[in-house]
Amino acid sequence: MKICVASPDIVGPIKNGGVGTACTALAQALASAGHEVTLFYTSTYFENQDLAYWQEAYQKSGVRLIGLPEDTLPPVHRTPTVYDQDNIARAYQVHEVLKHSDYDLIHFVDYIGLGYFTALAKSQGLCLANTRIAVTTHSPTLWSRLTNAAPVDDISYMVRDRLERRLVELADIVISPSHYMLKWLRDAGFRLPARQVMLPNLMPAHLDLGRLHGAPPPAATEPGPIKELVFFGRIEPRKGLLVFCDAIDRINAELPPEVKITFLGKAGRDYPQEVLEARATKWGRPVSVVSGLDTFQAVDYLRGAGRLAVLAALHDNSPYTVMECVYHRIPFISSDVGGVAELIAPASRAAVLFPPTPAGLAEHILRTLADPGFGAAESAFDFAEHRTRMLRFHAELAEEIAADRARPPAPPPPRLPLVSVNILHYERPEGLAQAIAALEAQTYPNLEIIIVDNGSRTPEAVAYLAQLEASRRGNLHIVRLAENLYEPAARNAGAYAARGKYVLFMDDDNVPKPQEVEVFCRAAETGGADVLTCFNDHFATEAPPESEREALKRFVVMGDFGPLGLICNSYGDLNSFVRRDRFLEIGGFTVDGRFNHAEDWRFFAKAWSKGLRVDVVPESLLWYRTTLASWGSGWRKRDRNGALMRAAEIYLETAPEAVRPFLLLSQGLFWKASSAEGARREASREAADLRREVARLTAQAQAAEARADMLQDAYAGLSHFVLQTVEPSAGASPELRRGLEHARRLARKFG
């Protein structure tokens, strides 16, 4: 098969991490079994070397490595997430790489949900018709955050969670390395696909040596006295850091004085080396912090004589720390949490596992130190059999995919539903003419155009509407409103007049791309959404540019933003595709008789809250006219507080009364933090500009100083030349004497 493994964490660029270790091991195993494997590193962050270096290293294992492209034209509008990078934009970039690929199978990881748009577009029948999508559940964001006793203090975590949930729901297959994680997902309300598979993680091979996976495990470390307790894992609370330190506090006086304490793992931001050393001062024994090692170096360290690995996690899925100790026959003890017990043979569990409390760990350490025969635990499974199971599963998938491709293609739909395009017009005849021309160039044939004139009065607008009526085009209708009723009421009037199954709402300053209606209709019919939005490209010229790369920016949204719409609108833009019957059932746009913006946000929130399925087509289907001067400065956009409150009303209607103030508080605190972060970024940009200007002026000053030195040298040389050649023959000429005196002064000054 042709297989892609896509992950924001892989071995090499990232020194250590369970997700990366699993993805690298999977890619190596599949490649060694003869599959054509591409490892897609969906990040631009490198702790070690660069992409070219690791491409060469992975090639030795028969794995092709690719990364995100540096060219991101047109630039992507940033989703307001305050601190985190824009993962919605990154999921879009991943989709752009994969949507035209011909992989038989794409493996995504759940973490961050970067496969969301790819899985969504596939479910809408827009791409990857012959591709299966599998998602392996390693580390959901909220699981990791909450089990680490860390607050959910930014919407970024909620956006990640939303992306992860939708990716899992849209996948063809969910793979879990433990029964524990599948249960957690169900308990957390994840919607899982029908096909759920439990496949334990594999062990990776050294990249530099290109060793075959599945080689016999090394011999066990010989039992002997324990001289070093090694906290093994990321240095953070979820991995049991505080439990470990509290346990040592309890038994420090009972530990032999020669026993050393070591922290082995990637240091977290909250617990750097100096904090750990300060915490350990009272123990009065040797303490060291070993960080920065990769997966293989950490194992080599633990295999040293006299070392006991202590794994004290409060929560864990199917941790590689346990797998590595079992596989490499390293003596260890571990907290009995999550899927840990699933990795250890029943006969070894009593000796190895302890309850995840300081008292439980302290007691177990003393018991282990007192056991002269304590050694490596036995595995609950055969590692070679795990690899065989994984490869057998992929062989079965290959047969299924081949059978699917051998079947004749499904017949086309019997008919194309009528689509009513609802154009809101007010005093912009030139824009309206451009929009109509673009609609007449659509690739979708079965549509009607309904122009809702919202009380235009200018002679130009009135004359153009009269001209359209006189043309007697059968698919074009005009609804004239006697006065400006504002956007919501006017759009509703067009929907009432429509005859189509679907209504495409747009304004007279939008320019649809030729495939807009066709793609919208295919996505709605295949994916089953009631409301669809899309990406759009902004332009500020008289007509859209010829190339999408020349757009000012691309507006990318998530579509199914769910309750996060309380905070900001990532549902989409007003240019939306709606099932007319569902639209009428919920009462359409909210009419309050006021001239305001954000009526689209308000409608999407209303549709979602009333149970309609809101999605996005992850393609740019229209050109959105804007002006550079209006970005962030439009007078209606200044009414952000009004827009927030109008959106909040939708959620407050269904929330318990006691919870409503906290919803408003979360909304307000987010935008307060967002404004502060925006000011910080602007100050940072200004500071960077100032640093660049200082560097430029400094370089100019240095260049000027160098030129001055050269001139001084030239003056000095010229003065000596004059004195040597002219003075002997100067005679009594006063003019020459004065010149020679000047030359002597220059020679003394510069020489």
Image (tube, helix red, strand yellow):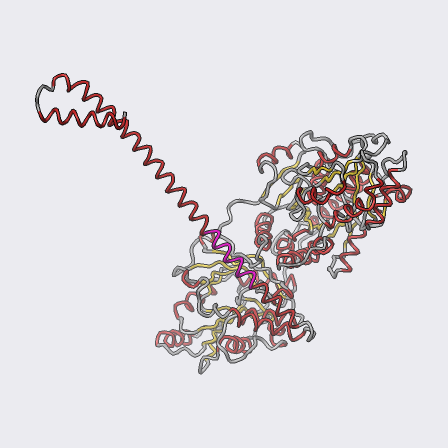
Residue 25 visible: yes
In this rendered view, identify the residue nearer to me: 175 or 596: 596
Against 727, residue 596 (above or below) is: below
The percent position of residue 36, horizontal first and vertical second, equals: 67, 39
In this rendered view, identify the residue nearer to me: 569 or 547: 569
What number of labels is visible? 0
In this rendered view, identify the residue nearer to me: 372 or 284: 284
The percent position of residue 743, horizontal first and vertical second, equals: 19, 26
Against 306, residue 449 (above or below) is: below
Residue segment shown in magenta: 672-685
Q: Does residue 207 show up magenta in the picture?
A: no
User: If the image is split into quadrants, where does the N terminus sit?
Assistant: top right
The percent position of residue 480, horizontal first and vertical second, equals: 45, 79
| Residue shown at 55% from the left, 58% from the top | 79
Furthest residue toward right: 347
The percent position of residue 252, horizontal first and vertical second, equals: 81, 42
Against 655, residue 337 (above or below) is: above
Furthest residue toward bottom: 482
Q: Is residue 739 left or right of residue 176?
A: left
Q: Is residue 201 left or right of residue 6?
A: right
Q: Does residue 684 show up magenta in the picture?
A: yes
Residue 4 visible: no
User: If the image is split into quadrants, where does the C terminus sit?
Assistant: top left
Furthest residue toward top: 728
- Tell me where residue 672 sits by quadrant: bottom right
In this rendered view, identify the residue nearer to me: 253 or 48: 253
The chief SS type of the magenta part is helix
